[in-house]
Amino acid sequence: MKSAMNTSKLRCWCEVNLSAIGHNLKVLRKKIGPGPKIMCLVKADAYGHGLVPTARYFETSDCQMLGCAHLQEGATLRKAGIRLPILLLSAPLTAEIHDILKNNLMLAVSSLDEAGRIAQTAEKLRCIARVHLKLNTGMNRLGAEPVEFCKLLDYARRHPRLRVEGVFSHYAGADSDREFTLRQWKLFERHTPEDISRHICNSAGILNFPKSACHIVRPGIAVYGLSPVPGKQDWFKPALEWKSRVTFVKRISKGTPVSYGSTFRSLRAMRVATVAVGYGDGLFRSLSNKGSVLVQGRRCRILGRVTMDQIVVDVTGLRRVRNGTEAVLLGRQKKDSIIATEMAEWAGTISYEILTHVTDRVPKLYIQ
């Protein structure tokens, strides 16, 4: 599928395939069945896919709620006209509560103190604060301990300015630790009432523990086409492709250093190409002398250090590489492909960080 836009004048860009996101939602829906609502996470610029455009797509798809990190993201969506229910998953600053309520955003609440501050602000605004109460089951990042959670639930249900729209927790190791995850699930089952919407499943929880889908699920990385669970990547279609262009091609002789610090020296005569992407665009510097890009369908190794705006790659043996030739950092070219999971292995990180690291100076084109 090709973009309707002419990319010939773009040095470095991303293409986001919204149809791939639709496919991934269908995979998740099949896994959880028809009952649970799907809350698509759009925090961190929709995992690097673009906050507002992806949210607009979710409004037309099988998505009933959105999850953001904080006020700024939620307010941006409201300003763009997004009407879906939005839950802010991080703890609010006291100074943010007024604007959170004015923007009709739901709050995650982890303590009686938080609930009191939210109720006080709602009283001043003469409005109802919509809240989801969080139980700590083992993540130990947010959430009330079980004894306090019971008090929090009782307080919130009784307060005239608070409306409890959900209770939730978060799996800490659903991709890797079955025993710990089952302990979290049992704790969640025991301490949360079934007459309120419950949610605990992230992407890994949906794939490995679909019976704990409850009333709502909160997929993140899987919506965008990457499986957090080994062996299930084939189920999904990565939605984002990251591309750049060759700007310069030259031949170098044996023993020639490349890039800062001369960390690479050629062992033979080579043909090398400069590509218009660097850590200023979000390409990890740790890919120096490690990663590859696709040029004419072949993997071309990064030579030397990744610099702010450019990299140098080995195109020895490729005849038609010239100024303007497309280089694929993430995505498919001919019969080969590179996904963020593989790039993350080269960089010593995780796919989430690869996707969210792409900077604002890289334009995004949307394809459907």
Image (tube, rainbow, N blue to C red):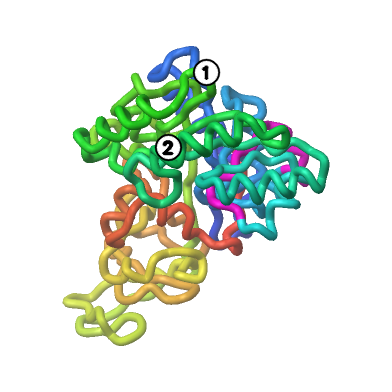
* 74 shown above or below 56: below
In the image, which residues are magenta? 78-92
Give the residue drawn at x 61%, y 30%. 157
Give the residue drawn at x 25%, y 33%. 183
Q: Residue 180's image quarter?
A: top left
Q: Position of residue 186 (x, y in %)?
A: 30, 28
Q: Quadrant of the C terminus?
A: top right
Residue 80 highlighted magenta (yes or no): yes
Residue under label 1: 195
Question: Please, what secondary structure does the residue beneath circle 1 have?
Answer: loop
Q: Nearer the viewer, residue 92 or 308?
A: 92
Q: Nearer the viewer, mark 1 or mark 2?
A: 1
Q: Position of residue 205 (x, y in %)?
A: 35, 31
Q: Which mark is residue 180?
A: none
Q: Position of residue 144 (x, y in %)?
A: 44, 44
Give the residue drawn at x 67%, y 44%. 52
Does residue 46 appear anywhere in the picture? no
Horizontally, residue 91 falls left or right of residue 120, namely left
Residue under label 2: 169
Crowd class of label 2 (few under 14; some 14 to 19; many from 20; radius 10 Å): many
Give the residue drawn at x 63%, y 33%. 57
Q: Position of residue 303 (x, y in %)?
A: 30, 72
Which residue type carries mark 2?
Ser
Horizontally, residue 51 falls left or right of residue 340, namely right
Main secondary structure of the magenta stretch: loop
Horizontally, residue 73 falls left or right of residue 243, namely right
Question: Please, what secondary structure does the residue beneath circle 2 have?
Answer: loop
Q: Nearer the viewer, residue 160 or 343?
A: 160
Which residue type carries mark 1?
Asp
* 170 shown above or below 303: above
Q: Residue furthest bottom?
A: 261
- Give the distance between the C-alpha atoms of the residues marked 1 and 2, in whole angstroms: 16 Å
